[in-house]
Every structure is written in structure tokens, then in C-alpha cells.
Amino acid sequence: MSDPEVSRLRRIRLALLVGALALFALLYAPQPVLPQFSADFGLTPGTAALLVSAGTLGLAVAAIPLGTLSEVVGRRRVMVTALLVAEAIGLALPFLPNFPLLVGLRLVQGAAVAGLAAVATAYLADETGGRNLGATMGLYVAGTTIGGMSGRLLGGVAGDFWGWTGGLTAVAAVAGACTVLFVVLLPTERNQTRQSFRWRPLLAGVRAAATDPGLRAPFAVAALGMGSFVAVYNVLGFRLTEPPLSVSPALASLAFLAYAAGTVTSALAGRLADRFGRRPVLLSGLGTALTGLALMLAGNLAVILAGLVVFTGGFFAAHSVASGWVGTLASPSARGQASALYQFAYYGGSSVGGVLGGTAYAWWGWPGMSAALACWLALAAAAVLRARNRVTTPEPHPIERVPS
């Protein structure tokens, strides 16, 4: 690869890294201050979780239209516009102390960030030409974990001192700096073949991706895995701050440092998938997440946090591999739609799982919620195992790096 190509690839990687950081910091900014929302507005955990679920629901609904739009107007244009709109809304949220209005605006913000989340995979697949896509996708997912961790950590600490408005303001400020870097660094796409604005072929791409048997396994991992993940992190603050643990909100927010495990495992899983194949690495990630979920059943704070680290690392390893799998399996003419459908499953699962998880916690406590999440993860693993007889794309040779 020539020096200009190497430089361009580095710019793409860095741009998508900071873009993912901004996206996930904004998307999950309310999560660490949900107990403050609950107290200020007199809400149950399940109702307060609507602030998170509204954002992910907006993303899920808008993912397919914006992913399809990127096939027509260009991927960079959609991603840049989306992140700028999401940042503007993030700056406005702290000045709206009305819960229904906050939920409505969060829905719009989620729809905005769909333009980046739903298109990034297709952009990477186009612009890298399949070279080391697993490692590049792993770096992008690592950016999502850094954004998720830093946004939650900053929001939780600031929220303990200045309330939920201070928490949201601090996150929006950091995301704003990342947004500027993203706009400056991201190169214009040059390998995408744009389609004309005709609904029939564009919808045909959506239909082809939705009915492709090879994509069912990664879609299942996206929906069930992300539903489990968001349920854990939505409820975690309540469990840690309530008796018998009774940890302060600022200290409880330090639990989001567990995201660092996802930063490491997502990048590592991408490289391992390039070398050994996606299916075994994906199953290992789901198994690791189940192990962490079991550890969190303990009543000891140290064991709970250790389990959270294991659970987080396993989930992000699985997500990194599943998302890269979509970019590889999808037809080039429907790559944007396939990526959007993955995001639809991912954030649709987040919206539903977040609310159901909070409701299960309110009814049955942490053990009952954990049992439900274990079933979801087991179903995701079963979908991957079932795909063995359905996916015709050959698995890579154990000692070869496969061009995706």
C-alpha cells in the first residue's frame, strides 16, 4: 500500500474513532444520571429508562431510511450532517426540564445519530477495499466503547455534583470537540458507486438484506446481545446506589470504566476473526458475556464489578465480529441497507431490552432480570450455531488472513 493510501486509511480510522466516541457519548448521556432523573421527576426505573430507549428507538427507526439515503447522496454527507444535528440537540437538552419533551427530543437525537451508526460499516467496507476490515472495524467498535465509557463516566461524576443538567452539559461539550475532529478528518468517499434516487431498486436492496439467510445470525446477535447489554447498564446505577450496597452516584459511575474491557476485546476480536474465522470468535464472545452475567449475581461489590468487566468485554467482542460480518456478507449494491438493518436490530434490541430489563428488575430484582438476559444471550448463540448449515460464505483458513 502506498504512503498516500496508508495516510488516508489512518485518517479514516481516526475519524471513525472520534466519530464513534461522539456518537455513543451523546446517545447514552442520560444513562448514568437515570437515578437523578428518577428522583427529580418521581419516576420508576423502567420509566426513567425511556430517556435511553427513546434515543435508541429513534436510531432504530431512522437507520434503514438514512442507510438507504447514503446510497444516493454519499456516505460522508449523511454521516457529517447526522453528527452535527445530534450535537446541536445534545447542547439543548440540559435546558429542557420537562420529561415528556426530553423524551421527544431524545427520539429526534437518536434518529440523527442513525446517519453515522447505520452508514459507518458500509463506508469502511467501501473505502478499505476489504483490506484488514476486521481490524479496522474492531478499531471503530473500540471507539464506541471509549465513547460509551467516557460519556457515562463524565456524565455520572458531573451529575453527582451538578445534577442531571450538569451531567448532560459536560458530555455534550466533549462530544462537540470530537464532532469537529470528525468533520475535519473524514475523507470524502471515492469507492462508492452511488445509485439514482429510485425507490424500487433501493427497497430491493433492503429486501435482499432482510431475507438473506447469512445475515440472520449477526442480526440476532445485534438485537439480543444489545438488549441484554443496555438492560444491565440501565439498571446498574439503581442496584449500586440502593441498599445494601448504597454506593454514592459519583462512585457508582466509576463502574462504567468496565467499558475499557470492550475497547480491548473489540479490537482483539476483529483481528482474531480475520485469522481464525468469525463464528468461533463470535461464540466465544457470547459465552464470555454469559459468564460475566453469572458473576454479577454475587452480593459482593468487587465480584459484581469483575463480572461487569467480563460481561462488557464479551459483548463487545461479539458485536465487533457480528458487525464486520454484515459488511462482508452483504452485496456491494446493498451494503448500506444491510448495515442499516444491522443497526435497526441493534438499537431496536436496545430500546426493547432497556425497558424490559428495567421492568424485570422492578418486578423480580437483579436475579430475575439476569435469568431473562441469559436466555436472550443463549438464543443469540443458537442463531450463530444454526447459521453453520446456512451460511455458504467460506470460513477463513486458520493460518490465513482473509480478504473480506
Image: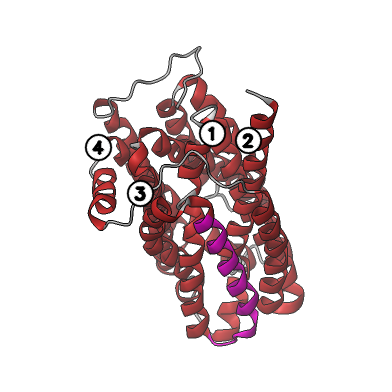
Identified by mark 3, the residue type is Gln
Give the mark nearest the N terminus, 2 or 4: 2
Mark number displayed over residue 213? 4
SS class, disc 1 = helix
SS class, disc 3 = loop
SS class, disc 4 = helix
Mark number displayed over residue 41? none
Residue 378 makes an appearance in the image: no
Distance (Cα) linking label 2 and label 4? 32 Å
- Specify the quadrant of the image occupied by residue 355: bottom left
Front tag of 1 and 3: 3
Q: Residues within 10 Å of mark 4 (few under 14, many from 20)?
A: few
Look at mark 3 in the image and give the residue it sits on: 195
Distance (Cα) linking label 1 and label 4? 25 Å
Residue 150 makes an appearance in the image: yes
Residue 65 part of the magenta segment: no
Identified by mark 4, the residue type is Pro
Look at mark 1 in the image and give the residue it sits on: 128
- Specify the quadrant of the image occupied by residue 68: bottom left
Identified by mark 1, the residue type is Thr
Give the mark nearest the N terminus, 1 or 4: 1
Give the mark nearest the N terminus, 3 or 2: 2
Residue at 34% in and 20% down: 394
Q: Mark 1 touching mark 2, by CB under 8 A?
A: yes
Give the mark nearest the N terminus, 4 or 3: 3
Residue at 74% in and 70% down: 158
Residue 89 part of the magenta segment: yes
Q: Position of residue 116 (x, y in %)?
A: 51, 55
Mark number displayed over residue 9? 2
